[in-house]
Amino acid sequence: MPVPERTDEQFSIALESIQGKRRAELTVAAATALLDRFADQRDPVARLRLTHELIRRNFAPDVRLDLGSAVLGPDTPEPAETTFRAEITGGVPATLSAGYRVPDPAGRTAEEWRNALTLLAGIAALGAGGRLTCP
């Protein structure tokens, strides 16, 4: 392999590594922000609403949170490349669903996006006094 091609390949690998780290840092920042907001809010339903808003702003504009008596988000989400659905059981039962679309504003892959939502939904479940199930 000629030297310029090898250099380009190494540069591409290094750039992808840096971008992947940046995307992971954005997810950790979102999780930290959610935990900080939970510290100021003791009501489990309000914590779920905070989670919905954070996800809507940073991960999926059509995220839906079904609290049984209240629903936040659209009744019929737009078609998505991949979907996320989680059940919060115990405490305040709820269902969280969202769709991933390309391009993701932060450049996350579908797998990175799903992992980020699983982390945030897990935090929300704990904040609501329950546990998370991703069917």
Image (spheres, helix red, strand yellow):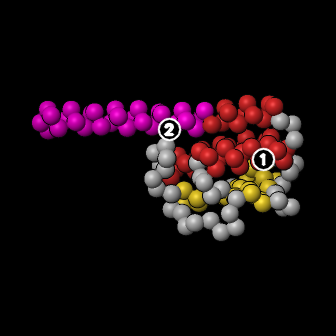
The answer to which image quadrant residue 94 occupies is: bottom right
Question: Residue tagged by mark 1?
Answer: 48
* Mark 1 neighbour density, 10 Å: few (under 14) some (14–19) many (20 or more): many
Q: Residue at x 34, y 32 (%)?
A: 14
Q: Amino acid at mark 2?
A: Arg
Q: Residue at x 67, y 33 (%)?
A: 33
Residue 87 left/right relative to 60: right
Q: Residue at x 82, y 59 (%)?
A: 70
Q: Secondary structure at mark 1?
A: helix
Report if residue 91 lies within the magenta region: no
Question: How far apart are the alpha carbons under marks 2 and 1?
Answer: 24 Å
Looking at the image, can residue 86 be seen? yes
Residue 69 left/right relative to 9: right
The residue segment tinted magenta is: 1-29
Q: Quadrant of the C terminus?
A: bottom right
Q: Quadrant of the N terminus?
A: top left
* Mark 2 neighbour density, 10 Å: few (under 14) some (14–19) many (20 or more): some
> In this picture, is 91 found above or below 5?
below
The mark total stands at: 2
Find residue 23 and name its label: 2
Which of 100 and 49 lies nearest the eye of the viewer?
Answer: 49
Q: Secondary structure at mark 2?
A: helix
Q: Position of residue 51 (x, y in %)?
A: 72, 45
Q: Position of residue 23 (x, y in %)?
A: 50, 38
Q: Main secondary structure of the magenta part?
A: helix
N-term mark: 2 or 1: 2
> In this picture, is 65 found above or below 108?
below
Report if residue 23 lies within the magenta region: yes
Q: Position of residue 77 (x, y in %)?
A: 62, 65
Q: Amino acid at mark 1?
A: Leu
Q: Residue at x 54, y 56 (%)?
A: 100
